[in-house]
Image (cartoon, helix red, strand yellow):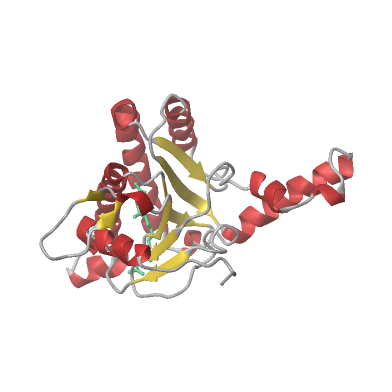
Amino acid sequence: MKKLFAKKNTAIIDKDRLPKHIAIIMDGNGRWAKKRGLARSAGHYAGSERFRSAAKYLQKLGVEHFTVYAFSTENWKRPEDEVSGIFSLLEKYLYEAIDDLKDDNIVLSFWGDLSPLSPKLVELIEQTDRLSAKNDGMHVNICLNYGGRAEIVRAVRSVAEDCASGAIDVSDIDDKLIDSRLYSKNTPPPDLLIRPGGETRISNFLLWQLAYSEMYFTDTLWPDLTDDKLEKIIIDFQQRNRRYGGL
Ligand code: FPP
């Protein structure tokens, strides 16, 4: 049994039983900033830095897929300057990712309806798609203008169109077919969903994919969810008994 990052007298991660896919709702940036007397934008900046570090840590550990909720279909309701601040952070991340993608060997994907985004952001995303195609390391999926219900509606429409055109028969519709019409196609479902920030709900995130995921909720705010804390969460996950509806 290979083990990683042994620490004195503490449980350690079993590298043979790593979650293949970890998803995170990056919540608590605003409160993190408020506690420090800073603007909410400073919280999102700290959140984006934590995302970069977490991705590096999880990649080093050997996690294969890492999916984060960066901007939901409901987040447009926030003040305009906060929305544009989050998009600026994404733009900054993309510029840096484009430079680093070759060395980092991550496969970067964006899940969500990208049509209302600025042409600049869409162009950067297309560029990272092209560069990512050459990589075979950890898959990092950033959910952007994403909603779980909207994703399912999109999949149902695509299946309905194929039924109407005669390309498929109603009897062909099964789990696998629906899976193949989601943004997450070709990705195993998350083994573990982590939500920092104290809320215990999934907020329209990966509604289909989370069917059998283990949930971990913590009061720690996202920018404070250090690699050490992630390590403890993974150890907690490894102690759980997953039954998938069986005994
Ligand atoms: C939720 O916290 C966080 C968001 C809606 C935005 C998350 C975005 C980022 C971390 C930046 C994305 C950038 C990259 C590079 C992935 P909240 O603002 O609702 O926190 P609160 O509940 O404390 O107010």
Ligand 1 is found in the corner quadrant, namely bottom left
Give the camera-side residue of 192 and 222.
Answer: 192
Q: Residue at x 24, y 50 (%)?
A: 3
Q: Is residue 101 above or below residue 43?
A: above
Work out which residue is located at the far left of the displayed protein and give it. Answer: 8
The image shows a total of numbered marks equal to 0
Looking at the picture, how far across and down is residue 75, in whole percent?
A: 47, 61
Q: Quadrant of residue 6?
A: bottom left
Looking at the picture, how far across and down is residue 238, in whole percent?
A: 36, 62
Q: Quadrant of residue 37?
A: bottom left
Q: Residue at x 32, y 67 (%)?
A: 236
Q: Residue at x 58, y 46 (%)?
A: 183
Q: Can residue 67 be seen in this snapshot?
A: no
**Which quadrant is the C terminus positioned in?**
bottom right
Q: Is residue 58 above or below residue 229?
A: above
Q: Is residue 185 above or below residue 233?
A: above
Give the camera-side residue of 38 and 193.
Answer: 193
Left or right: 207, with 169 as reference point: left
Q: Can residue 205 be seen in this snapshot?
A: yes
Left or right: 28, with 33 as reference point: right
Q: Is residue 200 above or below residue 41?
A: below
Q: Residue at x 47, y 73 (%)?
A: 201
Give the camera-side residue of 240 and 92.
Answer: 240
Looking at the picture, how far across and down is residue 121, in whole percent?
A: 44, 37
Looking at the picture, how far across and down is residue 110, in whole percent?
A: 48, 42
